[in-house]
Amino acid sequence: MEEKMQPAVVFDHVSKEYTLYRDNKEQFLALFHHSKNLRKHMALKDVSLTIQKGESVGIIGNNGAGKSTMLKMITGVAFPTSGEVTVNGRVAALLELTAGFSSEMTGRENIYLKGYLLGLTDEYIRSIEDKIIEFAELGDYIDQPVRTYSSGMKMRLGFAVNINTDPEILVVDEALSVGDARFKRKCKDAIGEIIKKGTTVLYVSHSPADVRKICTRAIYLVKGQVVFDGDVEEALTIYEQQNAGKAKAAPKKK
């Protein structure tokens, strides 16, 4: 009997509550004194879903729907208040592309630093180093301190590292606004190639065209809850209809 393949990601009745502070002073005082007056925000509410290996799943919804919170839990940046998140496979995240860089180290040195943070060995990083450098298109800047880079150059390097580490699960949050139109196309093509290899992809985007092109399934979140999980076209239709309804209901400015 064949062993059943483990799913890539499982959310089991997951909720996430954040405490909202007015300022740094209130946050500091909360470390010592419990206050019932602190505001709470439920970013996710009792979310249960399973993503199988090799699926390309679009996560859609308005700002504040809980999309980024969901991705942060998959990457281990945030943890549920209740419920359980299970992830099977090495994750590469195209979220905050420049996170983990040292400004005093060169671009080349930061490739190794990011690789270590991803749990990669020296030997493996060396095997993909040239590929990363070629993809980032930084020229001689690759051996200059990252503090001399523009924000766009740092993002290109971050994208190049994450996309070329052969991840089993790729998490993307509107990270394709990297560089000019030609480089954006290069990034999208790279994601397309990863999908062809069977990598699991979770993709957050406000672009229906990108979701249609990249994803075979869509999850629609509203105020931290899953209101639809299934066919991409059906999800986008519901999403667009609900937002069209809100637009019509909005009062006209005088």
Image (cartoon, rainbow, N blue to C red):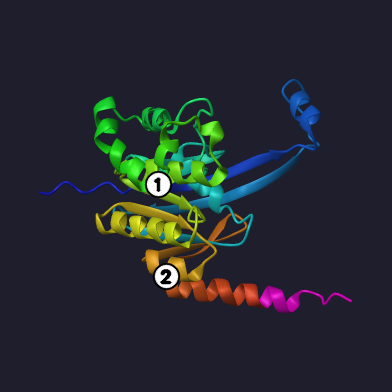
Q: In the rendering, which numbered label is found on residue 137?
A: 1
Q: Residue furthest top?
A: 32
- The picture places residue 41, in percent across and down from the top left corner, at 68, 46
Q: In the rendering, which numbered label is found on residue 212?
A: 2
Callout 1 amino acid: Glu
Disc 2 packing (10 Å; few <14; some 14–19; many ≥20): some
Looking at the image, residue 157 lies above or below residue 61: above
Q: In the rendering, which numbered label is found on residue 62?
A: none
Left or right: residue 2 compared with residue 111: left
Point 39% across, 33% down: residue: 111
Look at the image and say whether residue 47 sits in the magenta stretch. no
Callout 2 amino acid: Arg
Quadrant housing residue 81: top right
Looking at the image, residue 180 lies above or below residue 142: below
Quote the CA–CA distance across marks 1 and 2: 29 Å
Decide: marks 1, 2 in contact (CB < 8 A)? no
Look at the image and say whether residue 248 sits in the magenta stretch. yes
Looking at the image, residue 166 lies above or below residue 146: below
Q: Secondary structure at mark 2?
A: helix
Give the magenta-colored segment's residue range. Answer: 245-254
